């Protein structure tokens, strides 16, 4: 044992110094003569030496002492030291050491560079300080780029990125492209994608060339609520200089994904627009879009044609925010634990912030995201804990809530899935009655309609959609917990049974991610679970994955940027505020910032955060 302990200390701290711990051993006496390496020494490295030296050089420059070069730009004349300029600028270094005429003449004359920019850059060589403002950045950035002073270029780009606004984004984007500032250009493009509806209202957008306009309107990453916004922006551009631009209407419409507009909008707004109807090609594009809706909705076309660019919705990556809504937590007032709280999570900043609360406190609700809106559905209220039919819609653009059409059946402990821009409310319980019923909500018509019920009643069921199907897993049928999984086909309006879960459970979560389903946590009748199972529809099999960091039930989950997030819930008998993130590529979990209030029975959804 002693040997093991000694080995442990050797491994962790390194072997002991024998001369210190074992004094009985002979210690050789110091040599009579010291080698050069053994002589005492001290290294003096003052922190301010470089700054003080350059400050003295700047003072000498101001008094024209030992200066050996003159820098001229317009009416500006500056004395300087070649060695200082060459040390700070590769441009000057090449000029003075490469045999150029300026190295012999002692005068450097800049013909097309702004004098103030040259003055600021020469000062920077001595003082290591430059101030970037909106008044000088357009001259300072190209001048610093010419002199290859990359640190100043980066400072200019950082400043311009911090000043991005819908009114100037397109101008800064063009400026960055002219001067080959690739990182700034990328930031401008991302800003333009994220804030397109606002940018389209400003003069810079209306004065774009047609070529630049087409590039922007063809961008598949525009952050828009619907294709109607893109159409209206293009139409506004045309009408800004109507006589010169009206001939371009058909080419402009080809940049817009017209089949993605609603049939009502096409028939009412586009069909009544004379610019479109007076153009032969424009009328043809409108008819193609209407034909798409006719085949899809009215002719019950059962075929599944390959998606084209014009029928592929736009998606703005990196702009999806996670929203945690409602639930029950510690009593906040009058011993009432029910919450109207709505929090929004910024993935990049790893922080939560509060947004507008719901119209009423409730728990056990479910949240679905469709068309850039969040729908808070059902649950039970703080008044009498009875199941609710109510549905609230949250608009991230205006940070506001409004009531929409209620469900046909009051539900709590139910499942929710979205498919083809519709919401499915599945199972649940009302006043002791377990439900097998399923109803579908169409946001465009604002109507709920019943579809084929499940094969079994399910309370506390998990639901998700994947590859054109809706799945319902686990739950409780009034007799006991279930491990069965059903799949709904909306084309045939039928449910079929697929492979069971590994064990019965309820109060967990079912999430679609990367073409697979993940069944997460829950309760098995005896214990809160820590399990994660993955279902592959191609093999019709479940596989165990990395367990959750903690046991969880009564939580909610969603996918943001290819990662699965678990929010709140209960760890055994204790409510938690923790949030865990799962990476399917590495099969690993990691913690992120927690919600502000520990709670369970909350709903979680994902939507573009237009406000932030």
Image (tube, rainbow, N blue to C red):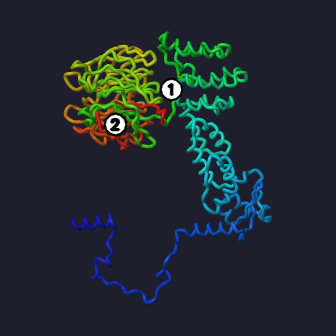
What residue is drawn where x is 37% and y is 20%?
A: 424
Q: Which residue is mark 2?
A: 567
Could you say whether the residue bearing mark 2 is in a helix, strand or loop?
Answer: strand
Could you say whether the residue bearing mark 1 is in a helix, strand or loop?
Answer: loop
Across and down, in percent, residue 225 comes to 50, 26
Q: Earlier in the sequence, mark 2 or mark 1?
A: 1
Q: Residues within 10 Å of mark 1 (few under 14, many from 20)?
A: some
What residue is drawn where x is 30% and y is 16%?
A: 409
Task: Find residue 525 and report its image quarter.
Answer: top left
Across and down, in percent, residue 208 comes to 67, 31
Q: Residues within 10 Å of mark 2 (few under 14, many from 20)?
A: many
Task: Find residue 6 and report its image quarter.
Answer: bottom left
Across and down, in percent, residue 233 comes to 60, 25
Q: Nearer the viewer, residue 369 or 515?
A: 369
What residue is drawn where x is 33% and y is 19%?
A: 496
Q: Nearer the viewer, residue 450 or 356?
A: 356
Task: Mark yes or no: residue 535 visible.
Answer: no
What is the spatial separation of the Cα atoms under label 2 and label 1, in whole angstroms? 26 Å
| Farthest residue, direction bottom | 32
Q: Which residue is mark 1?
A: 225
Q: Of discs 2 and 1, which sits in the foreground?
A: 1
| Farthest residue, direction top | 299
Task: Find residue 433 and report its image quarter.
Answer: top left
């Amino acid at each position: 044992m002693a040997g093991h302990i000694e080995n442990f200390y050797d491994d962790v701290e390194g072997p002991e110094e024998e001369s210190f711990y074992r004094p009985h051993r002979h210690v050789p006496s110091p040599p009579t003569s010291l080698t050069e390496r053994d002589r005492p020494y001290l290294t003096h490295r003052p922190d301010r030496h470089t700054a003080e030296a350059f400050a003295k050089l700047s003072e000498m420059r101001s008094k024209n002492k030992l200066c050996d070069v003159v820098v001229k730009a317009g009416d500006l004349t500056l004395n300087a030291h070649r060695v200082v300029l060459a040390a700070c600028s590769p441009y000057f270094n090449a000029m003075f050491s490469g045999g150029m005429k300026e190295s012999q003449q002692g005068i450097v004359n800049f013909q097309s560079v702004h004098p103030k920019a040259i003055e600021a850059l020469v000062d920077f060589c001595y003082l290591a300080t430059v101030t970037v403002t909106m008044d000088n950045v357009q001259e300072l950035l190209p001048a610093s780029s010419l002199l290859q002073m990359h640190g100043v270029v980066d400072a200019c780009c950082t400043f311009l990125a911090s000043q991005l606004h819908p009114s100037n984004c397109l101008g800064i984007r063009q400026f960055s492209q002219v001067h080959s500032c690739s990182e700034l250009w990328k930031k401008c493009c991302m800003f333009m994608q994220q804030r397109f509806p606002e940018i389209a209202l400003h003069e810079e957008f209306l004065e774009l060339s047609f070529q630049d306009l087409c590039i922007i309107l063809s961008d598949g990453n525009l952050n828009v609520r619907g294709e109607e916004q893109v159409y209206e922006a293009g139409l506004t551009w045309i009408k800004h200089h109507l006589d010169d631009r009206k001939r371009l209407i058909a080419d402009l419409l080809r940049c817009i994904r017209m089949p993605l507009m609603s049939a009502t909008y096409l028939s009412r707004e586009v069909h009544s627009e004379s610019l479109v109807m007076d153009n032969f090609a424009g009328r043809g594009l409108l008819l193609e879009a209407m034909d798409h809706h006719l085949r899809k909705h009215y002719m019950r076309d059962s075929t599944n044609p390959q998606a084209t660019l014009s029928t592929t919705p736009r998606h703005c990556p990196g702009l999806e925010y996670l929203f945690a809504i409602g639930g029950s937590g510690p009593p906040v007032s009058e011993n009432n634990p029910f919450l109207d709280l709505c929090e929004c999570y910024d993935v990049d900043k790893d922080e939560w912030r509060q947004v507008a609360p719901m119209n009423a406190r409730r728990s056990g609700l479910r949240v679905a995201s469709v068309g850039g809106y969040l729908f808070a559905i059902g649950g039970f209220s703080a008044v009498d804990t009875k199941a609710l039919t109510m549905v609230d819609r949250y608009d991230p653009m205006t940070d506001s809530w409004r009531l929409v059409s209620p469900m046909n059946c009051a539900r709590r402990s139910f499942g929710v899935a979205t498919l083809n821009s519709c919401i499915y409310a599945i199972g649940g319980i009302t006043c002791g009655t377990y439900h097998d019923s399923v109803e579908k909500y169409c946001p465009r018509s604002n109507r709920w309609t019943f579809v084929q019920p499940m094969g079994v009643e399910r309370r506390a069921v998990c639901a998700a959609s994947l590859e054109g199907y809706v799945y319902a897993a686990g739950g409780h049928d009034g007799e006991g917990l279930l491990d069965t999984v059903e799949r709904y086909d909306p084309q045939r309006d039928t449910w079929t049974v697929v492979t069971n879960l590994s064990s019965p459970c309820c109060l967990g979560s079912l999430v679609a991610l990367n073409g697979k389903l993940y069944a997460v946590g829950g309760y098995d009748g005896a214990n809160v679970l820590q399990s994660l199972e993955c279902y592959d529809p191609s093999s019709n099999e479940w596989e165990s994955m990395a367990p959750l960091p903690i046991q969880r039930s009564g939580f909610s989950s969603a996918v943001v940027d290819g990662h699965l997030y678990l929010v709140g819930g209960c760890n055994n008998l204790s409510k938690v505020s923790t949030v865990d993130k799962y990476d399917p590529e590495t099969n690993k979990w990691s913690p992120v910032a927690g919600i502000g209030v520990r709670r369970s029975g909350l709903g979680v959804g994902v939507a573009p955060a237009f406000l932030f």
